Amino acid sequence: MLGYRPFILDEPVTAILLIAFFLLIAFPVHEFFHAYAAFRLGDGTPRMFGRLTLNPIAHFHPIGGWMLIISTLLFGLPLGFAATPVNPMNMRGRYAEAYVAAAGPVANFLIAAVFAIPLRIFLATDLHIEYPIIYQALRIIVLYDILLGLFNLIPIWPLDGGTILLTLVPRETAWRLRPIFSQYGMFILIAIIIFGGPYLGRLTNVIYGFLVG
C-alpha cells in the first residue's frame, strides 16, 4: 500500500500500552467476572477450564489475542476478543445468563471508575506533564474500559448485550432471534459499528468526562 506505515512505527508507546492494557487488564478482568458470576450461579465449567483466575495467560485467546496484537501494531485498532466457556444448563435462575453476561461490562466500568481517581489527580496537578507515559496509560485504561463496556452491551449476539437480550425476552422471541443472530449477527454488528460508531464514541467521551472531570 503506497505511503502506508504500520502504526507501531509512528506511535510505538501507544501501541504497546494498548496491547498491554487489553491483554493484561481489560480482557482478563472482563472474562474473570464472567467466570466468577457463572461459578457463583452454579456452573463449574469456567473453573474446569482454568478461567476462574486473573492470570492473563489463562484468558489469552489464540485467535482473538493475536488479532488484537496484529491489528494494533499495524493500524492502531485493538480488534480482538477473549472468551470464557460456560454452560447455562448448570446455572440457577431464569436470568442467570443475563447476570453472567452483564458481569463482564460491569467489570470494565468498575475498572474505569477506579483508575479515574488517579487520572483526576494527574490532571489536577503537573503530574501529567512530569510523567506523560503514566498519564497516557491511565487515560487509555479509563477511556478504553468505558468503550469496551459499552461496546459489549450492544444487544447483538455474540456480544454480551446479545446474550442479555436473549435472556430477558420471552422464550418464543428468543427462539426466533437466535437463528437471525447466528446468520446475520456479525453483519448487523458491523453495520452498527460503521453507522453507530460516532454515537458510541460520543457516549464514551461523555462518561469519560463525568468520571475524570
Image (cartoon, rainbow, N blue to C red):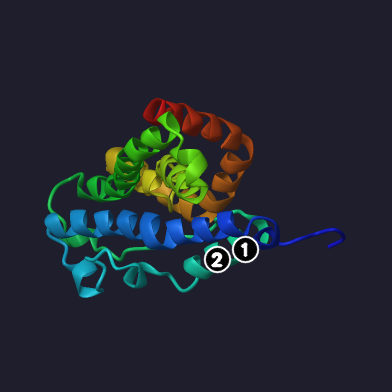
| Residue 40 left/right relative to 143 | left
Q: Quadrant of residue 83?
A: bottom left
Residue 207 on image: x %, y %: 42, 29
Residue 62 versus residue 127: which sits nearer the camera?
127
Q: Which residue does the numbered mark 2 point to in the structure image? A: 69
Helix, strand or loop under label 1: helix
Residue 25 versus residue 105: which sits nearer the camera?
25
Residue 170 appears in view: no
| Residue 95 left/right relative to 102 | left
Rendered position, 92 above or below 56: above
Q: Disc number at residue 82?
A: none
Q: For the C terminus, give its image quadrant.
A: top left
Residue at (33%, 54%) from the top-left corner?
A: 30
Residue 102 appears in view: yes
Spatial distance from mark 2 to mark 1, Cα to Cα? 6 Å
Residue at (25%, 51%) from the top-left corner?
A: 100
Q: For the N terminus, give its image quadrant.
A: bottom right
Residue at (23%, 58%) from the top-left corner?
A: 88
Graded by Cα atoms within 10 Å as few (under 14), some (14 to 19) or many (20 or more), the crowding at tag 2 reads many
Residue 74 on image: x %, y %: 67, 62
Residue 35 versus residue 92: which sits nearer the camera?
35
Residue 46 on image: x %, y %: 23, 67
Amino acid type at circle 2 is Ile
Could you tell me if the residues under marks 2 and 1 are in contact, i.e. CB atoms within 8 Å?
yes
Helix, strand or loop under label 2: helix
Residue 139 on image: x %, y %: 46, 42
Residue 135 versus residue 82: which sits nearer the camera?
135
Amino acid type at circle 1 is Leu
Residue at (37%, 48%) from the top-left corner?
A: 160
Q: Which residue does the numbered mark 1 point to in the structure image? A: 73
Graded by Cα atoms within 10 Å as few (under 14), some (14 to 19) or many (20 or more), the crowding at tag 1 reads many
